Amino acid sequence: MSFPTPDGVVRAVRGMSFEVERGRTLGIVGESGSGKSVSTQTLMGLTRGAEVSGSARFEGRELIGMPAEELRRLRGAQIAMIFQDPLSSLHPLYTVGWQIVELIRIHEPATTKAQARKWAIEQLALVGIPQPDRRVDDYPHQFSGGMRQRAMIAMALALQPKLIIADEPTTALDATVQAQILDLMARLQREFDTALIMITHDLGVIADMADQVLVMYAGKPIEVAERRELYYRPHHPYTVGLLESVPSTTGAKERLKPVPGQPPSLLRPPSGCAFHPRCPYVMPKCRTDVPPLMGEEHLSACWLPLDVVGLGPEAARRRTEESS
């Protein structure tokens, strides 16, 4: 996926490939600007002006190039999205209940307003909003941040979609409310057997929610593995850096290890591996050759052998030189 700009073509997403089944959660993690959000927004037809190639199939139906009217019928009913900022996603001039009612009646035209209103109240109660029969007539600004996010989840689940895309749904919430929202989403996912794509930069959220994790960097997937495999045996140096930059919960007084440098410009990405300017393990080959995603169940786009990450840069270089 690319965006033409006056300064050149921004190659926002390249080589993206994943699948997610019902009842399973795929976590997509990476720094801001790595392509997490736009890759999934493209599936929903929300990236106007982008040049898109490739294939995205939902239950055998091709989403890329799908007619706008057909895609509108799919959005909300079978594929729903929970956005990062519910205050900008909910219309400020309409009550929360009215917006849920409209969603229901658009996709279920035989439903009366009274039936849809009752349905909306039931959905608000399902996500834990107190006095839903009264709050259904409140406007978004009358809800707290956590309640607005619950209302967005209620709207997303109103028609029991088969896939939910949650784009950083807890970023603006405090830790207590964040935990409540994550618990709510996990419970509702189990109840409705929904497939979930969770987009976040928070590795703690991924540890709680995901079955499989996809790490993105500079618009490309660089590591894909089951959650426990990725957390306990990470391979790509960028993934290792992300994990080392998470504060310890054991009480140990250790300095954080930030990933040095800045993400590259997607207008002019570096040659070879995009991470090589920031990588402590960099070798000459990294600067010239682009590593493909390699492996069977644990995929990684890195020229390092699987058993050298964690040895340290010097030991890794020695091991690599010996093996070559």
Image: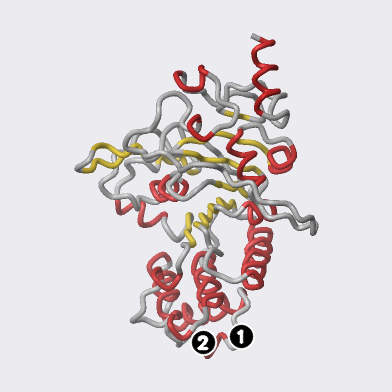
Residue position marked by numbered label 2 in the rendering: 135
Tag 2: amino acid: Arg
Between 66 and 205, the one nearer to me in the picture: 205
Between 33 and 191, the one nearer to me in the picture: 33
Q: Residue at x 66, y 55 (%)?
A: 204
Horizontal side of residue 141 vs 8, given as left or right: right
CB under 8 Å between callouts 2 and 1? yes
Crowd band around label 1 with a 10 angstrom C-alpha radius: few (<14), some (14–19), many (20+): few
Residue at the limit of the structure toward the left, as seen here: 6
Q: How is the image coloured?
A: secondary structure
Q: Where in the figure is residue 100, as x and y percent of width and height?
A: 45, 74
Tag 1: amino acid: Pro
Q: Residue at x 24, y 37 (%)?
A: 8
Helix, strand or loop at label 1? It is: loop
Q: Quadrant of the C terminus?
A: top right
Residue position marked by numbered label 1 in the rendering: 130
Between 34 and 159, the one nearer to me in the picture: 34
Horizontal side of residue 303 vs 65, given as left or right: right
Query: Quarter-wise, where is residue 232 in the image?
Result: top right
Q: Where in the figure is residue 153, as x and y percent of width and height?
A: 54, 68
Q: Where in the figure is residue 107, as x and y percent of width and height?
A: 41, 64
Between 114 and 30, the one nearer to me in the picture: 30
Is residue 289 shown above or below 139? above
Is residue 49 shown above or below 253? above
